[in-house]
Amino acid sequence: MDTSWFLIFADALLILHTMLVGFVILGLGATFAGYFLHWRWVRNFWFRLSHLTVIAVVVLQSWLGVLCPLTSWEMALRAKAGEAGYEGSFIQHWLQSILYYSAPDWVFIMAYTVFGLLVLASWVLVRPER
């Protein structure tokens, strides 16, 4: 297989991963904004369940010290293409790249946990409807 395909798939995974991060972050903001602006769609059960599930997986992985499968898969594809991967988690890498910020793992674990608790709290404050 042409190695350029590995890079295309790795980039596609990077885009998917970025979209999932955006979904988690923007989803929580939209949920609380929707509560105050009376947006009915933020109470959609399936939207809320998928949002809670994604952040729950992130929190669980961080507590277990497991690298996200999307990150592992992307790095493996980049390695097959002969491109250097990156170390650490997806968020850690891109935050460091974007913000030049480096922190110990416990900072990210705490941030994920607090964010996960906020998403859980949104289930109580902005109840989903079936």
Image: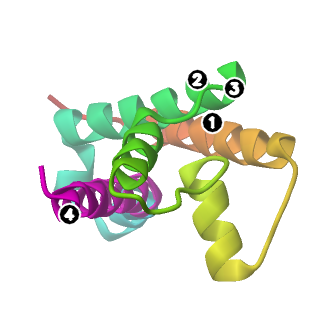
Q: Which of 46 and 98 is in front in this view?
A: 98
Name the quadrant containing residue 34. bottom left
Image disc number at residue 65: 3
Q: Please provide percent x and percent y for residue 66.
A: 61, 26
Q: Which residue is drawn at 70% across and 42% down?
A: 114
Q: How crowded is mark 1: few (under 14 residues within 10 Å), some or many (20 or more)?
A: some
Q: Which of 91 and 116 is in front in this view?
A: 91
Farthest-out residue, bottom: 99
Which one is earlier in the sequence, the residue at label 2 or at label 4?
A: 4
Residue 62 against residue 110 in the figure, above or below: above
Q: Which of 5 and 71 is in front in this view?
A: 5
| SS of the residue under disc 2 | helix
Q: Please provide percent x and percent y for residue 76.
A: 41, 42
Which one is earlier in the sequence, the residue at label 4 or at label 3?
A: 4
Return the residue at label 4. Answer: 8
Q: How crowded is mark 4: few (under 14 residues within 10 Å), some or many (20 or more)?
A: some
How far apart in space, not on screen, are marks 3 and 1 (Cα)? Answer: 19 Å
How far apart in space, not on screen, are marks 2 and 4 (Cα)? Answer: 29 Å
Residue type at numbered disc 2: Leu
Which one is earlier in the sequence, the residue at label 3 or at label 2?
A: 2
Return the residue at label 1. Answer: 117
How far apart in space, not on screen, are marks 4 and 1 (Cα)? Answer: 35 Å
Which one is earlier in the sequence, the residue at label 4 or at label 1?
A: 4
How far apart in space, not on screen, are marks 2 and 1 (Cα)? Answer: 12 Å
Return the residue at label 2. Answer: 60
Whether residue 90 is visible: yes
Which range is magenta? 1-28
Which one is earlier in the sequence, the residue at label 3 or at label 1?
A: 3
